[in-house]
Amino acid sequence: MKMTFRWFGEADDTIELSHIRQVPGVTGIVGALTHIPPGEMWPYDEILAYKRKIEEHGLELEVIESVNIHEDIKLGLETRDGYIENYIKTIKNLGKAGVKVICYNFMPVFDWLRTNLAEKLADGSFAMLYDQELLKNKTPVQIVRDMADGSKGFSLPGWEPERLRELQTVLEQYENVDEEKLFNNLEYFLKAVIPVCKSRGVKMAIHPDDPPWSIFGLPRIVTCKENLERLLGLVDEECNGLTLCSGSLGANPDNDIPHMIRYFGKMGRIHFAHVRNLKIIDEGHFHETSHLSSEGSLDVFEIMKAYHDIGFKGYMRPDHGRMIWGEEGRPGYGLYDRALGIAYINGLWEAIGKMKGNQVGV
């Protein structure tokens, strides 16, 4: 596997590339042109300039997270074709620049959602928390305000202000969109872009819904093994694949993450891996935690063993971390705890490989 680190760019990140370069085992950046609104084309010269800045620090840019999908595509509106055409142009430009994987999601209106971006844990660190009960007495508008208030002035990936300014209108548009229609709209999109990806050597990797259940009655379809299998079958090509996020899917204890890794990994359809842990308090109530298995509800050793068993050679990154040691920055995306996560993941990977080697030699 190739270990990577998400970075939001010089103008929108507290972390320097030179510091990321010092994290053992990191070979590349997972990046994005976050200033370009969903639906607009990414210019080739901007992609190239961004890539060169990363390469100056001895790192690669082969994964983009995310080229966000315009809401009109998810809604299936007549205007979607123009936005899909812009997406295709962006794919071509990214492929020309050497990008191999595009991570994206198909979540209506809201991207990942938490009810507290800075929950203080028993050890004094701060982590993001989700509590379904707290949503019952809040409107979507209040949730958007809460997320903005907790962002510490940083942009939050997937929470584009241009889209959320028209929140009420968008919510009304989704009143006639159920899971089946959303699947149909995803199929329409994939049938347009996957042939281009195939010709340009670019793989699409859809990210699971976070959390993996409906919020405010909105349909969510990237939630479980059965739905992942269905969406891969919409266009049965290798470049139509997955970003398998242990934390997003793992919020539902019915999702067996190691099994899903082996199942979809053997199909060759996991192109990007997000590895993180979380602590499930009860149904619909969890918080982020360190990557260490004993700190959360997921067995990260078994997750890494599953990736090792399938001979995973794709891209991996530590996902959301806590804010520790007084670090200030974008919630979930500090340097220190994610660096600790990388050290833990790499340690497990090396140990599993050596254990297997010893077993062969016995």
Image: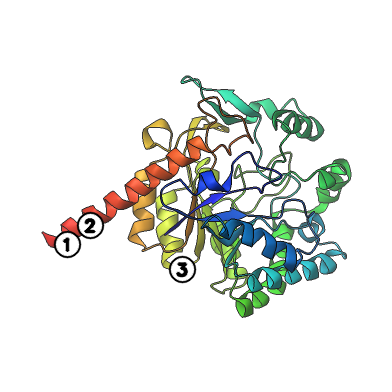
> What colour scheme governs how the chains and residues are painted in the rendered image of this protein?
rainbow
- Whole-angstrom CA distance, mark 2 to mark 1, is 6 Å
Q: Are marks 3 and 1 in contact (CB under 8 Å)?
A: no
Element at badge 1? helix
Asked whether 112 or 92 is in front, the reply is: 92
- Image vertical order of residue 207 relative to residue 194, above or below: above
Label whose residue precedes the other's in the sequence (3 or 1): 3
**Position in image of residue 156 (x %, y %):** 70, 41
Mark 2 residue type? Lys
Q: Which mark is residue 142?
A: none
Decide: few, some or many residues near mark 1? Use Cα within 10 Å; few <14, some 14-19, many ≥20.
Answer: few
**Residue at the disc numbered 3:** 268
Q: Residue at x 65, y 47 (%)?
A: 8
Q: Residue at x 59, y 31 (%)?
A: 128
Question: Where is the N terminus found, in terms of image quarters?
Answer: bottom left
| Residue 329 sits in quarter | top right
**Residue at the disc numbered 2:** 356
